[in-house]
Structures are given as structure tokens and as C-alpha cells.
Image: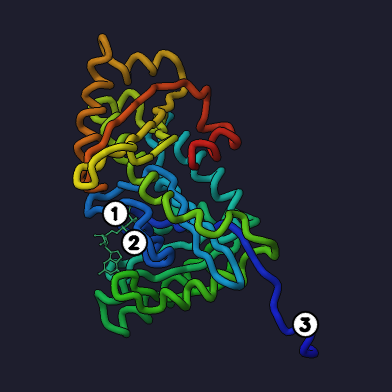
Amino acid sequence: MDGMNATPAHRAGFACFVGRPNAGKSTLTNALVGTKVAITSDRPQTTRHTVRGIVHRPDAQLVLVDTPGLHKPRTLLGERLNDLVRATWAEVDVIGFCLPADQKLGPGDRFIAKELAEVKRAKKVAIVTKTDLVNREAVAQQLMAVDRLGRELGFEWAEIIPVSAKSGDQVELLADLLAPLLPEGPDLYPDGELTDEPEQVMVAELIREAALEGVRDELPHSLAVVVEEMTPREGRPADRPLIDVRADVYVERSSQKGIVIGPKGARLKDVGTKSRAQIEALLGTKVFLDLHVRVAKDWQRDPKQLRRLGF
Ligand SMILES: Nc1nc2c(ncn2[C@@H]2O[C@H](COP(=O)(O)OP(=O)(O)OP(=O)(O)O)[C@@H](O)[C@H]2O)c(=O)[nH]1
């Protein structure tokens, strides 16, 4: 190749991390993006919400979509949630299968990998996570185990890589390996998009958690929250700022609206009080929270709505 064509084409695309609960997907997303985007916790299955983080590089833009976990479906809703996961998988360019280095490859991993084998378009990357917890020998064993798993299921991993999101070991390299797997194209999102999004996403997640409390069985995955506005109130003294947060809680059917609002609005008020306290703790300032409940019919099934709702 001569000097004129030496610059590789710019690439941009979507990737998501999959893996059993607690595999380290959110932590890895945060490590790659360099900003806290998804909320992590020691509790399994906190990532029900699909959250985007964007890795901006000179040569590529990698948009990370955080899908909910795929589970052995026991209910119709579980089945629908899995549909949502598969719909996301069908749209992304790269899927990173996360496997913790400190746990033996088990039935849960196999279940997910089997599903992965059905995904045709996306390139699949195996990521052995939490390598700081074990010695090199154990990491090597896990790399071989996941390699075998791919072959058993009849597909090949585009890459297999060990990382530690905690220590940062190999995180850069992971980004270097993911970037070339994306399709050629210009940035999908403007640079700087990230600056206020993570906070808004976290605020939305706090409201969603509060709104789900006590009604999880009735509306497990039919709730989405979009923060429409987050602005400092003008004319406040510098030492006592106030942030106005306007957010919409979306349900799928009008019958669900009543559940969220509660008798005489009592539930929604409670949701507001609870989530406001947490938002204030997160932002470190007083907050005025303005909550509205809206119906977005069958949002889980409509790609346009999903995108609007941040999925
Ligand atoms: N030692 C170590 N711990 C990690 C690492 N990455 C994640 N963890 C821990 O593992 C636990 C689960 O991490 P998450 O990132 O929340 O895992 P997840 O896969 O997003 O979990 P779900 O949301 O339940 O699907 C947390 O306690 C993390 O602190 C790592 O590289 N090293």
C-alpha cells in the first residue's frame, strides 16, 4: 500500500456485552467509556435498563448498548424480555460475551452462548473478565474453555481477550480490538454527547427503580423513564442551587397508568419523594422533580419508540 492510502477508514457501530448476572458487563462498560454510565451493584440483575455509553476515538466511535440479561424464560414476560434482548442482538455489530475468570463456565454461560450461536450478523468476541481475581494459569484455562465452547456450538470468536475492568488491565486493548470489527462509517453521535447523558440516564434509572418498587410483579419490564430536562433553576443563591428535573414515566397500556399513579396520585407522589432523595444524593444538590406518566403503546416492540426511550 502506498502512503496515500495509509490512513484506515473511520468506523462506527454498536456493541453490547452479554453474560450471566454479575459477569462484570456494567463495570466493563464504565471502564471503556471512562465515565460512570450504568449503575453497578453487588446485587445481580441491576442492568434491566438498556444504557448507552459512547467510546470516542480518532479512528472509531463505539456505541455500547447495555442489554438486560437473557434468562431461561419461565413466564410470558420473561419470554418477552428475551425477545427484547434478541432484538438488540440483531441490531448490533459486535457482541461481547463476558465470562468471569473466577467462575467455572456453567450452564448459564452455555445457555447464552447457544443463543449467541443463532445470531448471524454480529461479530462475537469472548471476554474473560475480572482477571485480577485469579492467577495467569486460571485465566489461560478460561480462555481455552471459552474457545472450546465456541467450537462446540459451531462458531468462531472474532477475538478472545482477558481483561480486568477493576485494574484497567487490557481495557485499552479491548477497545483496539473492537474498533476494527465495526463497519466503516462516520460517527453515529456527535462528540460530547456523553457529557450530560450519564447523569440523566442514572437519574432515569433511579426513578424507574422507585416506580417499580412494589409493582414489579404487575409491570416488571413495561416501565421506561426518560429524563426530558435537567436544568439549574435560575436566580438561586450560589450556595443553594436547585435543579429542575422533568421526567416522563412510560407504560405500555393505559391500565398500567393507574397502577403507577395509584389512588389519588398517592403512589406517584411516593415514587417522586423516594427518587428525589436519591437524585439529590447523586447530584449533591436540591432537586425539584416533575414526574408525568405517559402511555407509549407496546414500546417494547417498536424499534422507533425503543430508541426514543433510550433502548
Ligand atoms: N475484582 C473485580 N471485580 C469486578 C470486575 N468487574 C466487575 N467486578 C465486580 O463484579 C460485580 C458485578 O459487576 P457488574 O459490572 O455489575 O456486573 P454485570 O454483569 O453488569 O451484572 P448484572 O447487571 O447483574 O448483569 C461488582 O461487584 C463489580 O464490582 C473486575 O474486573 N475485577
Whole-percent x, y for residue 289 in the image: 30, 30
Q: Residue at x 38, y 17 (%)?
A: 257
- Classify mark 1 as within 8 Å of ligand 1 or not, answering yes or no: yes
The CA span between labels 1 and 3 is: 43 Å
Question: What amino acid type should be assigned to the residue bearing mark 1?
Answer: Thr
Any mark on residue 5, and which? 3
Contact (CB < 8 A) between labels 2 and 1? Answer: yes
Q: Tell which circle, 2 or 1, labels the residue nearer the N-terminal end.
A: 2
Whole-percent x, y for residue 269 in the image: 24, 21
Residue 217 placement, left or right of 303: left
Residue for badge 1: 40
Q: From what the image shows, is residue 1 above or below residue 134?
A: below
Residue for badge 2: 27
Dot 3 crowding, Cα within 10 Å, few <14, some 14–19, many 20+:
few
In which quadrant of the rendered view does residue 179 lie?
bottom right
Q: Residue at x 56, y 43 (%)?
A: 87
The CA span between labels 2 and 1 is: 7 Å
Q: Residue at x 47, y 41 (%)?
A: 82
Contact (CB < 8 A) between labels 1 and 3? Answer: no
Quarter the N terminus occupies: bottom right
Any mark on residue 2, and which? none
In what element is the residue under mark 1? Answer: loop
- Classify mark 2 as within 8 Å of ligand 1 or not, answering yes or no: yes
**Visible residue check, residue 157:** no
**Visible residue check, residue 256:** yes
Residue 204 placement, left or right of 4: left
Q: From what the image shows, is residue 32 above or below residue 236?
A: below
Dot 1 crowding, Cα within 10 Å, few <14, some 14–19, many 20+:
some
Q: If the picture is divided into quarters, which one holds ligand 1?
A: bottom left
